[in-house]
Amino acid sequence: MRVVIADDSVLLREGVSRLLADEHLDVVAKVASAEELLECVEAEAPDVAIIDIRMPPTHTDEGLVAAETIRRSSPRVGVLVLSQYTDTEYALRLLEGGEERCGYLLKDRVLDAGQLADAVRRVGDGGVVVDPELVARLVGRSRTSSPLDELTPKEHEVLELMAEGLTDRGIGERMYVTPKTVETHIRHIFSKLRLPETAADNKRVHAVLTYLRS
Amino acid sequence: MRAVRLLVWASGGALCAGMVLALRAVDQPELVKHRTLIGYTLLFVGLTIGVIVWDRRPDNRIGILLTAWPLVSILPDARWIFWNHALPVTLGFATIELFAPVFVHLILAYPTGRLTTRLDRLFVGFAYTFAGAYGLLFLLFFDPLSADEPNSDTCFIVGCAKPITHVATFNVHRIRHVFDWLALPLALIFLVLLARKLVRASPGGRRIVLPLSVAAFLVAGQFVAQIVLYGSSGVNTMTHTNWYWITAAAGLLVPIILGVDLLRRQSGRSAVADLVVELERTPPGFVREALARTLGDPSLELALWLPERESYVDSNGRELELPSSGPDRAVTVLGPPGSPIAALLHDPVLLERRGLLEAAGAAARLAVENERLQAELRAQLAELRASRTRIVQAGDEERRRLERNLHDGAQQRLLSLGLALQLARAELGAEANGASDLLNEAEDELRAALDELRELARGIHPAILTDQGLPAALRSLAERSSVPVNIVAVPDERLGESIEAAAYFIVSESLANCAKYAHASAVHVSITRRNGNAVIDIADNGAGGANPTCGSGLRGLSDRIQTLDGTFLLESPAGGGTHIHAEIPCAS
């Protein structure tokens, strides 16, 4: 899988690049700014671009803006945004551009090479990744009264994994149950939360996140 | 000069007396004798007032004009007393009808003694020329012995001397009526100019000009009416009909009004005495009003001199540039020369009452001094507020900078360190043994540090507020709150950095307090725009009893809102929940 890395810190660029190489991912380019990234994506057509959300010149959301641009101009390229922000706003903004081939992870995840490589692969394969910390906070968020209370502990767990962007199979593997069981859980969850059941697989992430946030 | 005035007054008086005596000797109806006696008495009264005004205000031409007006009304009568001497007869004809342009000049130049507009000067000049031409007609062509001349102009004394300037005999009376009819449009123009003067006058000026203008309207009006009704304004209509009374009344009004005005100037001293009493009761900030009332100029402004700043300020402490004195605005500086206390910006018409102006200024000195201290205080207060706002803004800017530095400096370095640890672990591979545990421990510490750093940066300044605006930032706060938050309303448009920051920190602090103390099960947050204000409401259903004076959090918020000219209100009855209400003015 061909990967490009965009980060204005050279230490991080190099470090992440070496970690991913150890995980057998092919880092084809490393760039320091959003502009270079766009040119590089055009030239290299990578499978995934790993993008730091803060880049010059203003160090706010340049990376996210670049990711949105790439999703419009090169839909075949997956984007994985690494962020210092734990605000769901940014993740949802990314998901609004289409619920495939994208991911929003806290930057701390680079400290776990396996987890990072796994996320890159999922995004490269067309999936969605949302940082578990964001999901955990949304699920654990205090509410006055909520249909969430009606969910069984198992269903709760499925909901969290679903929000992180896992597929039915992925959830099954994580929970050691068959995909059939997962499907049943998901049907129950959707009916308890009164979400439209037509939303299949990845399309569900946005619906679930929006529901959790409201 | 006083001798000249005395001489003028005495000779005018003598002329009046002579005229009355001469008339007694002539065979005339009693009615006419009576009325001429009254007429000359009135002229003498007018002359006396004129001389007094001239004496009191030698710098103002009004005195001379007011003296000249009755004088040139009497002088032509010299030809009747000294009828057989050519010189008085010549003098009489030379000044005949001169009273009209002098009157016009007097009224239009009142109260400054100067003709202010070009049109006024043109008109007065023309009136003098016109009267002069009329006199010249008699001087050159009038022959009392000519059989064609009716005796109307020499009605009392027949067969007077010929003017010494006589060059040819010509029937003057034939064209006399032409002059009368030409005088009619001139009188009408005068009325228009008078009306214009009234309309253009400042409120203070109008108050002074109005009474005299009414009298002048009456004088000119009755002149117009006489010509229209009788075809002549001559002596016969004046002495033989009831027009006489109107003429007399109108003619008397003018000197009386001017006399009263003079008295009023003197009574200005009593107005100053009233001012002194009034100022005792005047609260600071209202000295201007008291002065405006005393001086009769509602447009009066008070500029206070602040020596430290070397500039004038108004009573609110705002700096003020003194205008240069002109036709619309005059400036009078109060206080000893070189060290002003204050300046009055007023209607130039008040310069006519300089004595009153200076007396009032002197009387108000203490109050003005007091006012000045107040203004100074206000100026300092305004400066303080401005600097407080600057401090808050600088603080906000500094917070943003800190947040950036934490994210892009410390955090990046910690992450690099983490990466280095991972690579080290990979290098060690299977040989790690005990080192592996150490590395795990280090990585855990590192994660905790990163978490803390992230929360610290967030607390210093939320990047999401700058990037995404208030709605996103509030949703983010709600997500983090341990008490369920219901965001009722929040405007989508940006409100400006400092207002958004204030709103965000109010909500953030309130939610933190609510979580810590209130034991609430729900908080409602609403931010709306109403009447140019951002209105912020945060209400919980908790225990209440929050005290705004303790705890630096709320105190700081209240201060922050005040720097934005906003208001902050906390209601927290025990057991009744806590309600925080803040309003911050926002532009557009």
Image (spheres, grey):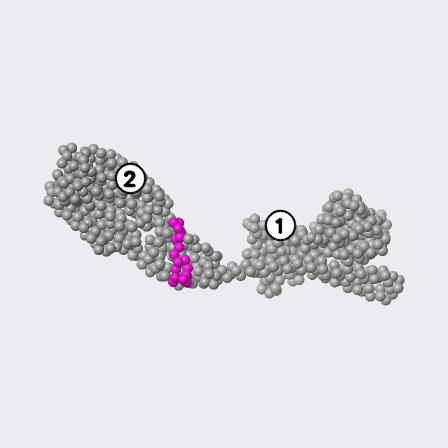
Mark 1 lies on residue: B494
Examine the residues drawn in magenta and state their main secondary structure: loop
Q: Is residue A100 left or right of residue B309?
A: right
Say whether residue A134 is visible.
no
Measure the C-alpha gap from mark 2 to mark 1.
Answer: 69 Å
Task: Residue B179 in the image: state x and y as whole percent.
Answer: 24, 36
Judging from the image, what secondary structure is the residue with disc 1 in? loop
Q: Which residues are magenta?
A: B325-343
Residue nearest the viewer, comparing B574 with B308: B308
Mark 2 lies on residue: B187
Q: Quadrant of residue B157?
A: top left
Does the segment drawn in magenta span residue B329?
Answer: yes
Q: Is residue B401 left or right of residue A77?
A: left
Residue nearest the viewer, comparing B467 with A37: A37
Q: Count the numbered circles shown.
A: 2
User: Which label is found at residue B125?
Assistant: none
Task: Residue B347 in the image: state x and y as whole percent.
Answer: 38, 52
Mark 2 or mark 1: whose residue is earlier in sequence: 2
